[in-house]
Image (cartoon, coloured by chain):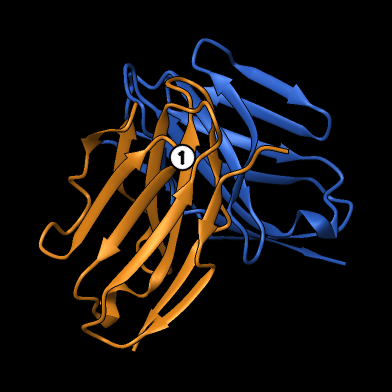
Amino acid sequence: DARVTQTPRHKVTEMGQEVTMRCQPILGHNTVFWYRQTMMQGLELLAYFRNRAPLDDSGMPKDRFSAEMPDATLATLKIQPSEPRDSAVYFCASGFDTGELFFGEGSRLTVL
Amino acid sequence: GEDVEQSLFLSVREGDSSVINCTYTDSSSTYLYWYKQEPGAGLQLLTYIFSNMDMKQDQRLTVLLNKKDKHLSLRIADTQTGDSAIYFCAERGTGANNLFFGTGTRLTVIP
């Protein structure tokens, strides 16, 4: 049963620490997305990749966030340094160009 | 830019029908989607409709699309307590890879 896998599921850290979230997309999918979900803002698109190339990261605070796909089986989202306002659930999703998106279970981040 | 709007909350009694509404602004939308999010989980695709269709039915789910008014609705017949979740409307524009999501509607089913 193919699924998008995200780690860690939960992360509590202190302000200023580096946080790295990882995502294993479904094998064969050529698009990967990072979304952030908060009560106030809902679902926000942070970045997305097509065939491992970054297509749009305009939703991401560039000074502290970075997203990469070192290979087809791994996407990473890094926050350095983290701030309390980064507390949210971060979702990774993968899919094909025009098909549905399959979401991971999310990584819940709490920055104290 | 794209804007997708939904009401935040809906409560219905078990066995009744639920209707969740969504409006969008992008007239070039090609596909419109309904996703369901249960507590502590990611989003799961429920159904989708192509923009040249008016209606799509899938078991207890009926999707209606009014392209002129840019209005999409999801009707759940015989709503069950297991249908309690957040429902997101999303649209994909022409040539776009990403989806734009609404705020989500939290459906509460009262036994």
**Quadrant of the rendered image containing residue A55:** top left
Dividing the image into 4 quarters, which one contains the C terminus of chain B? bottom right
* Image mark count: 1
Residue B109 % position (x, y)? 78, 62
Residue B39 % position (x, y)? 65, 65
Tell me the subunit letter for badge 1: A
Q: Which residue is mark 1?
A: A73
Residue B29 % position (x, y)? 39, 22
Q: Is residue A14 left or right of residue A108?
A: left
The image shows residue A98, relative to residue A66, as above or below, that is: above
Q: Is residue B105 left or right of residue A93?
A: right
Residue at x-position 10% and y-position 62%:
A63
Dividing the image into 4 quarters, which one contains the N terminus of chain B? top left
Residue at x-position 22% and y-position 37%:
A56
In this view of the protein, can residue B99 be seen by the observer?
A: no
The image shows residue B82, relative to residue A20, as above or below, that is: above
Q: Which chain is blue?
A: B
At label 1, counting other C-alpha atoms closer than 10 Å, the crowd grade (few under 14, some 14-19, many 20 or more) is some
**Quadrant of the rendered image containing residue B86:** bottom right
Residue at x-position 35% and y-position 62%:
A41
Residue situated furthest left in the rendering: A63
Residue B66 % position (x, y)? 51, 23
- Between A31 and B37, the one lying in front of the other is A31
Q: Is residue B6 left or right of residue B54?
A: left
Residue at x-position 36% and y-position 38%:
A71
Residue situated furthest top in the rendering: B52
Chain A: give its colour. Answer: orange
In this view of the protein, can residue A79 be seen by the observer?
A: yes
- Between B56 and B13, the one lying in front of the other is B56
Residue type at mark 1?
Thr
Mark 1 residue element: loop
